[in-house]
Image (cartoon, grey):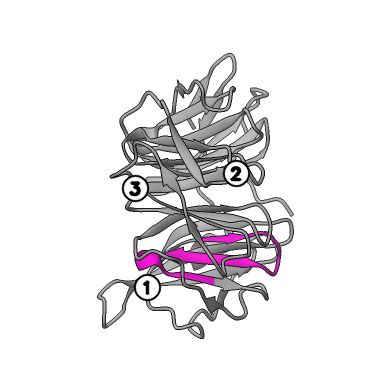
Amino acid sequence: MHAIVDAALNYLDAPGPEGRAALELRMDAIEDPAELRDAAWSLVRAAGVLEEEKGHAKGTAVVTSDGGEHWKGLNMRGAGFDARLMRVIFTSSERGWAFGESGALYTTHDGGASWIKLQPPTSYLLLGGSFIDENSGWLAGAGATILQTSDGGETWHRSQTTNAAHVRFNAASFVNARLGWAVGSGGNIHRTIDGGRTWHSQTSGVPVDLLDVKFLDSVEGWAVGNEGTILHTGNGGLDWINERSPTSHPLERIFFTDRSHGWAVGFGGTIIAYNLSGRPEAPRLRR
């Protein structure tokens, strides 16, 4: 275990899970996790199973309701799934969205038992998104795509972005219905203060692709990306600090349980933990 200790920043490398759930899924590639109080979902790409028409690995969703002791696959074929899915987002135990290549977007109202195909106004790859409730949400993707909905995905509106003509947006984070951030290729960070109608660029100070972003409130936020990049702001993105990182692997997702405890995961099974108190802790599932 390798720890980096700073006056305000404590990161450590943490081992991946070695329990039953990890063994059951060891032949798959975990695409994206989503967690709620009583359940967790993940997109999994089954190794070696190829679609005849497109020649790439099929995606499915697995769900646990006992802290990861047991996982079960969800039937996602009823809605005519015909694209690789990249991410899943749930706002409650019943309502969720899954999206991916070619503008594919699906929603569920029953915890994933059945899915409905939606029609967003894009054919670009959708890579990230943020929903703050069952109605208000945003999706981000290739081609400088940022879409906004206020009715759970039935209708979508394109956002206007400045200085982002060729940006691939990878993730978005909103703290309320008006204030949000999106990150993407080439170190791009954009902020909106009008619910996603317009976006304006911020200076990240890094040239690498940023893959995920998480704001804890209107001023404190984190972004992670290639080369183990970890960015932190305490003033809403007016200034971003490139924090020291214990890894050079791409970091693809970041998650916080509170202001003092967070985790980032990435390439090669990399898991790093953030602990503001200075006491090293490995990631663990909470029941």
The outermost residue toward the top is 7
Q: Nearer the viewer, mark 1 or mark 2?
A: 2
In which quadrant will I find the C terminus?
bottom right
- Amino acid type, callout 2: Phe
* Residue indicated by mark 2: 174
Near-viewer residue (170 or 16): 170
**Residue 18 visible in the picture:** no
Asked if residue 253 lies left or right of residue 279, the reply is left
- Amino acid type, callout 1: Ala
Q: Within the magenta stretch, is there residue 267?
A: no
Taking 142 as reference, is 176 above or below it?
above
Give the residue displayed 46% in from the left and 50% down from the top. 159
Q: CA distance from mark 3 to mark 1?
A: 19 Å
Residue 209 position within the rendered picture, expressed as x and y whole percent measured from the top left:
34, 39
Near-viewer residue (59 or 205): 205
Disc on the earlier residue, 2 or 3:
3
* Residue indicated by mark 3: 168
Q: Residues within 10 Å of mark 1 (few under 14, many from 20)?
A: some
* Residue indicated by mark 1: 83
Near-viewer residue (81 or 175): 175
| Residue 204: mark in rendering | none
Instruction: Point out the stretch of residues depicted in magenta.
Output: 88-106
Disc on the earlier residue, 1 or 2:
1
Asked if residue 121 lies left or right of residue 49, the reply is right
What secondary structure is found at the residue carrying circle 3? loop
Give the residue displayed 34% in from the left and 61% down from the top. 124
Residue 151 figure quarter: bottom right
Q: CA distance from mark 1 to mark 2?
A: 27 Å
Residue 103 figure quarter: bottom left
